[in-house]
Image (cartoon, grey):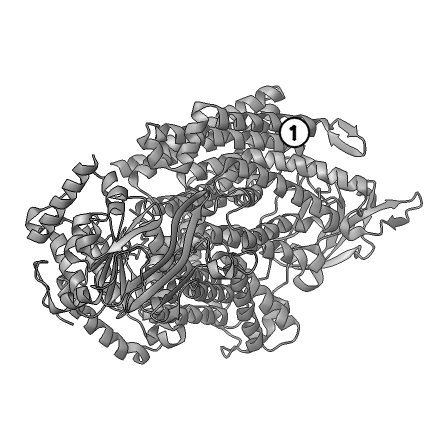
Amino acid sequence: MSSDVPTTTSTITAAGAAAKASVAGVSPTPGVAKPDPILTVDHVTRRFGGMTAVDVQHLEVQRGIITALIGPNGAGKTTFFNLITGFDKPSSAPKLIGGPKAGEAAKSSFNGNEVGNIGATKVAKKGMVRTFQLTKALSKLTVLENMRLGAKDQPGENLLVAIVKPLWAKREAEITAKAEELLARFKLLEKKDDMAGSLSGGQKKLLEMARALMSDPVMIMLDEPMAGVNPALTQSLLGHIQALRDDGMTVLFVEHDMHMVRHISDWVVVMAEGKVVAEGPSGTVMDDPAVIDAYLGAHHNTDLGDDSLLTDEVAEELAAEVTAEEGKA
Amino acid sequence: MDQFLTTLTSILNSAISPQTAALAIAAIGLNIHFGYTGLLNFGQAGFMLIGAYAFAISIIGGLPIVLAVLIALVAATIFALILGIPTLKLRGDYLAIVTLSAAEIVRMVGRSSLLTNVTGGSNGITGNEYRGPFTDLSFFGDGHIDFGPWSYDATGSNGWWFIATAWLVVALLCLFVWAIMRSPWGRVLRGIREDEDAVRALGKNVYSYKMQALILGGVIGAIAGIVYILPASLQADSMGRSMTYFIFTALLLGGAATVFGPVLGAIVFFAIRLFVQGVAGQFVPSNIMNGQQTEQFAWIVIGITLMLVVIFRPQGILGNKKELSFDVK
Amino acid sequence: MRVWRLIATIMLILTGVILALSLGASPAQAATAPPLTAAPCATDDATGCLQGTIKLPNGDPAVGIELAITGADLDTVAVTGDDGKWSQAITVAGPYTIELDTSTIPDGAVLDSNAKNPATVTGALNKNTGYIFKIVGGTTADDGTTTQTPTAAAGTGITFDRFLQQLVSGIRLGLLLALAAVGLSLIFGTTGLSNFAHGEQVTLGGLLAYLFANVLGLNLILAAIISVVICAATGYFQDALIWKPLRRRGLGTTQLMIVTIGLSIALQYAFQYFLGASTVRIDQANPVTVALGPVTLSAQSLISMGIAVVIIALVGFVLVKTRIGRATRAVSDNPSLAAASGIDVDRIIRLVWTSAAALAGLSGVLLGLVLNGVNWQTGLQLLLLMFAAITLGGLGTAFGALAGAMIIGLVVELTNLVLPGDFKYATALVILILVLLVRPQGIFGRRERIG
């Protein structure tokens, strides 16, 4: 794994360029087919009482790129995330009795496997690992123990093997070495023996991301990775996310802060009121009238953030948006 | 001064008595549930009772002692499965209520007059009916052995043979808990205690681990039941809800999620009770507090001690505040 | 400093409770007729106990049964007390013969034909040796021959009349249970705390009523009102002196729950300290019975049920119709949201504690009147049924608690139709476990609550 973290997001790496190129020819319409989808979701709906929180009929996520899932608060992004990762069950899930019709039942396949209805544990085992909006660092375990917990294929996690240390000591050493390497990359190595609970909010986010990487995931799902993070750390977090893609992972992340998304995502999916209303390359999707209507329309005071983060290209886009909004008003 | 010596002697005697060992063993089992995994098992006395009945009835039925112990362990496993299957996927409170209820059901059924032929109803089973095979195993001879301040028969029902085996079991279980809790298996349990969703997101089967912990702690509870009845008699009411509360008190006193906490806690638990009883008996005139009342006064002090420990020193005597076992913000 | 203030507070409360009880405790022993209370037998190195409990076929204790005990140097008669218990101290280990005087068995019941009488037991020192005589339904003819009612194991068999009788008893238990359970549920809803000491609040109510009515000789209604007011005060001060400071300290709900277990242990033994293990009856006059068709009820039962219905309806009205009730439900739903919308959450919780303790106390008073009496573990036995009721109804929903309590009450009493009394609580708990399997959120709980 590369340990050089890009510090400015305007640096476009070769992998980044390739990622953008892989979806260059895809038409920016909701539910469009991708050349090489790693995740395909069909007919996923979730109702709470009378309210429909999520209703996604079809969505594909391209392999090896950073896809951002954005939308205003309450758009159903996190619920959708929970549904894909098995932490929640779709209302449209197939049932033994009285479920939806065969063609309309929720279905999702990941990397060639059916992952609808198998539960969070198995989804994670298939290589789709997630983080949480409110960090779930295990606060009374040390940072290093948190990392070790993330690794898979641990013989010592079987009760009968666990009793005899020599049976798992070798794998434990490998895991520890890998954990330390990752901690060094995420600048947490000197904290390895501290309780995770003593870390700052941003460090917990980093730890959670690093812990997810311990299992060598195929796809990593980040739920609002930037929420509650000290702005000084945001830059480095964005760099880490890009580095994941550059290492060949697929990244899907939820964010409601738009300007974060522009810099690093190769493809953007926009949700509003539970539905996918638009998708496309980050450069162009913001111009979609549906997005402006659903998203910007609700947030006239979009925070433009730190100007130093903005490339000229992005600044132009924002200008275009402002014009579009004024035109509407 | 005589009174003081009597109290001291009775504390010393209780410190090594098989009953104290039994409480320690039950607390070791509960430690796996509550201390390490965060499972709220309020039916540990039920596990003890299941183990005790299965053992005693098997012996009376003519089975060899090894088989009788094995049956007790299997019975506890089945009991754990019955309790765990419906509740371990739900919020923790449900396990608490179900274990509390199930332990009471075991007690009520055990003491029911319908089963007098099998369980002895509310009279229970006297020790002589099942103690024989165990006493026969003794190689301590028939004499009387003085050791330090203690003087007991070598083999008799409150003799060294019973004391030695009980504490040997305690020592072996401590070693076992130490071995498994430093392993990756123990790490997963501690992770579940902190946040089971985070562990699920890392691809661990949380349900299976919780079940393993419930069974393991329950089986240890059954062993405690056997140790508890061997030198005494089997009475359903002696292993009721109060017993569960005392096990909790001992565990928290010594320190949850520590290897020796349950053992120290059990010894201290009895010591506090006898000390208070002794002091009250000596210094409070008997027209204010009679013999019966000093005993009850000691229990009141135990109740208040439990409150104070949980409030001011939740990590117990041996615990480390930083890696406390239960939710303290 | 705060630490010591807390310790002092807890001690103060307990001393208060102990003092309050002790005011009447010593005369209490004198007030209950001595021959009917079995002298408690305590074992030590030189003493052993022979003991047992005799129950009537309906599960009530059999009072005043005489047992002739002979053996070693002993030749005496033991008599069962108000709780059906008898005990006899022995100073020599060895065989003893116990013979039950069948003429002391009340009408309508006989000694089980399978029972050995006289029976021989082996007494040991420093040990309790139990023996149980089983009494079943039946009649004794003038010449002394007995006829046992055939379906002895299930009481008196299932007839429609008996079904109705048990049904009404079930409603009665359900209503009294609901009184106590609603408070437990409100506390859980507003603070997330499972209060294991709630049963002791019920016991406290019953014991206080006994103290005022019997020991101090007040009018029953006045005694009941004073008891409920004192119970309400214990709720108020508990929250003010223990629970609110602990919430401020940021104790988690698991920690708080274990604190309530400690409190429960301390209170149980405090009750025993003053009262011993005996059962006290609040109203010792023979109850006036009222027959409603095939159903016979004591006047006290009818009045108690009436009071329970009125109070429960009042609680429901307050929760649904008044500002304070809506605020309470808002706090149950989401405390931080409620706080943000201007509700004084601490005030609501104080109110909930106060009324929960008052309701539990009232339940204790009524139970003391309706059942045969109150003892130190009356509430303890009820606590599990309360938990079962609120889980069944859906944790934290007040109306669920009401419905759950009615179901539990009916199940407990109707079980008596087909199974011996030992099983009546067990069935209720089995049903609880079965319901959790199918519908974990309870009958009225929302699915989202399980998380």
User: Quick check: can you spot residue C26?
Assistant: no
Residue type, label 1: Met
Q: Residue furthest right?
A: C143
Name the residue: 74% across, 28% down. C286
Q: Which residue is mark 1?
A: C305
Q: Nearer the viewer, residue B65 or C327?
A: C327
x then y, percent, for residue A77:
31, 51
Q: Nearer the viewer, residue C64 or A194?
A: A194
Name the residue: 12% across, 69% down. A14
Name the residue: 14% across, 41% down. A323
Please identify the quarter of the rendering in which residue B206 is found. bottom left
Query: Along the horizontal axis of the image, is B55 left or right of C19?
Result: right
User: Quick check: can you spot residue C240?
Assistant: yes
Please identify the quarter of the rendering in which residue C208 is found. top right
Packing grade of label 1 (10 A; few <14, some 14-19, many >=20) is: many
Name the residue: 47% across, 62% down. B22
Query: Along the horizontal axis of the image, is A218 left or right of B231?
Result: left
x then y, percent, for residue A238:
15, 57
Element carrying mark 1: helix
- Report the label total: 1
Of all chains, the one bearing label 1 is: C
x then y, percent, for residue A16:
15, 65
x then y, percent, for residue A39:
33, 65
In the image, is residue A203 above or below residue B301?
below
Q: Nearer the viewer, residue C58 or B125?
A: C58
